[in-house]
Image (spheres, rainbow, N blue to C red):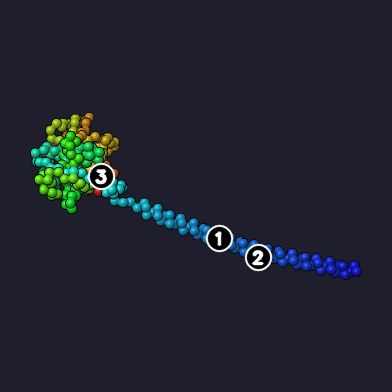
Amino acid sequence: MQQKEAIQTFDIEEKLNNSSSKRKSFSKKQKIIIASTISIISLIFITSIIIISTKKSSSSSSSNIPNSSSTSTDSSSLPSGTLQTTWYDFSGSNGAFYTYEQTQKYYSGYYTCAVKQSIEKQYNLKGAYIKLTYNNNILYVLNADILPDSDGYNAIDLANDAFSVLADKTIGVLSGVKWEVIKFDNKENKNIHMLVKENGCNNWWVSFKPFYQNYPIKKMEISLDNGKSYNEISVTDYNQYEVSVSDGNGLNRSYYVKFTSINGLTCSGKFTVNGAGVMADTGCNFN
């Protein structure tokens, strides 16, 4: 009886050992499967990170490619609107920004206008090149003068020959005329030029007027120490930039200059003055 019980006990222990061995063997397989799965998942994850990083790097590289200009030339940043238009005899006006004689000499072939004073001041439209549209008729004009607010019209006042492009002069006043500032039609691709005021200037005080700017000037800075430091020069109501020269060489020296347009473009150059009444090339313009 004891021998039988011993045999049974041995059988039970052997079964338990076999069962335990099978469980241990199954557990190793699970570990191998789990380890393999983790390795595959890790590989996929690492590969995804590499792909994403590569795309970001590529995107970053393409976004850092420099443009021809460091600032936007988006036309949406230029002022526009709807106004009335009237007309007047510009040949009999001295012109606030450019005189009739100056437009004939430096802007020959361009129509001219006078923008309402408050609108000009709001947008810095001295010397602006403006596109006008009325009943499918299109006119391009240079803002050379001021229409006083006291005139009573919310308008752009056109030289009489310019008005005729849009409508018959006998109409007198047009309403609903669309206007928008655009890039100057710089037919000869000229740089910005500075005209030294002929009368009233001396070696201690000089006044400049800009010509041929592709967009209206919002800010002008001048250096009197060969470009080491710059000072912003305010503009008068008559488009003059007045500079005080402490060394007494105002009419016989070089000026370093920086311009900023109303739509954020910048350019810098240098011009040399040799007397009053001269027109000097700055060597730069807004692109």
Residue 193: assigned label: none
Q: Secondary structure at mark 1?
A: helix
Front label number (3 vs 2): 3
Front label number (1 vs 3): 3
Q: Position of residue 212 (x, y in %)?
A: 18, 45
Residue at the disc numbered 2: 29
Residue 79: assigned label: 3
Q: Residue at the spot x=30%, y=47% of the render?
A: 71
Q: In this orientation, does residue 209 appear?
A: no
| Horizontal arrangement in the rendering, residue 267 relative to residue 21 (left or right) | left
As shown in the figure, which amino acid type bears the numbered disc 1? Ile
Q: Foreground residue, 186 or 168?
A: 168
Residue at the disc numbered 1: 41
Going from the N terminus, do you reach mark 3 or mark 2 first?
A: 2
Q: Residue at the spot x=81%, y=68% of the render?
A: 11
* The N terminus: image quadrant: bottom right
Vertical position of residue 268 compared to residue 51: above or below: above
Q: Position of residue 55 (x, y in %)?
A: 43, 57
As shown in the figure, which amino acid type bears the numbered disc 2? Lys
Going from the N terminus, do you reach mark 1 or mark 3 first?
A: 1
Alpha-carbon span between mark 3 and mark 2: 75 Å
- When asked about the image quadrant of residue 246, the answer is top left
Q: Position of residue 24 (x, y in %)?
A: 71, 64
Q: Foreground residue, 212 or 231?
A: 212
